[in-house]
Image (cartoon, rainbow, N blue to C red):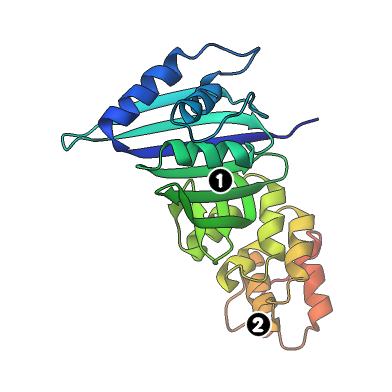
Amino acid sequence: MANWCFNSLSIAGPSDILRNAHKRFSEAAMIGGADGWASVVYDMADEARLCHADEVDRYPFNTVMNYEANHDGQATLEMTYDTKWWLDPLFMTVLSAVFSSCSVELYAEEFSSEGAVRYSWRNGELVSSEESVENVHSSCDSDWNDAVLWDDGRWEVDYIETPPHEVFQLFVSSEDENIREYAASNPHTPVELLIGLLTDEESQVVEAAWENPAVTDDVVEAAVREKHSLPESFDLSGFPRESLATYLMDDTKKLSR
């Protein structure tokens, strides 16, 4: 069974080229249950004597197009669409050659594998590529956010570069306990957020945080103070670490002043 892949394609360049492409793409006939504009790309490559191909391996579907022209003779054609698996590399090679006078950007995300890539072409040549290290879908207040960690260490949330602290705050605030558990076990989660995870209502989140190598004795004590509303003056030095764990994971055990 094929994995579905979301694709976001942006082509920026001369308005006459992109206006013609938008017209031809929009008028392309369906091929079975898929959108036919990918075949038009091969037709354009054939007409320009760039290459010849008889078929597309993985047709796009659910395509949404937006053409926007500027006053300086430049335009942008933006498209979102789904494919089964990644759209085949040959197609992107042909597309970048057809639009060699344009800038081409592709973001692709495969749902079930939770992988993402971003490619950029200039003058028909691939000039940059990046792959995701992590791809986390998080819900908070009924909204879903897509957080991607790229291989150069940058986080993006919904395509916007975001500081790591804000990303992990999003995870910790998630309504999905699996996302909170992910943050609890991640050694890069800021310490102040780990304190809150050690007092989470879900025991599996607390247990994941307890195993986090970033959770020091001081962090454990801070979490116990927070959960049991203890002042700084309350001396916890006589409690072994494992004993303090029971005051975090067992709600029947209470500490008081």
Q: Is residue 166 left or right of residue 123?
A: right
The furthest residue to the front: 49
- The spot of residue 78 in percent (x, y) is 40, 33
Three-letter amino acid code of the residue under disc 1: Asp
Residue 200 seen: no
Pick the front one: 177 or 149? 149
Rendering quarter of residue 161: bottom left
Residue 16's image quarter?
A: top left
Residue 185 in view in this figure: yes
Q: Which residue is mark 2?
A: 218
Classify mark 2: residues with Cα within 10 Å, few (<14), some (14-19) or many (20+).
few
Q: Residue at x 72, y 40 (%)?
A: 112
Quarter occupied by the C terminus: bottom right
- Name the element at disc 2: helix
Furthest residue toward bottom: 237
Q: Amino acid at mark 2?
A: Asp
Question: Which label sits in the foreground, 2 or 1?
Answer: 1
Q: Specify the label residue 146 is tagged with.
A: 1
Q: Residue at x 62, y 45 (%)?
A: 137
29 left or right, relative to 220: left
The image position of residue 100, as x and y in percent, is 40, 42
- Quadrant including the N terminus: top right
Image vertical order of residue 230 relative to residue 87, above or below:
below
Distance CA(mark 2)–CA(mark 1): 33 Å
User: 27 or 141, which is in the foreground?
Assistant: 27
Which percent across, then down, holds residue 210? 76, 70
User: Looking at the image, which residue is at 59% across and 84% down?
Assistant: 233
- Do the residues bearing badges 2 and 1 touch, measured as CB atoms within 8 Å? no
Mark 2 and mark 1 lie on one chain; the one further toward the N terminus is 1
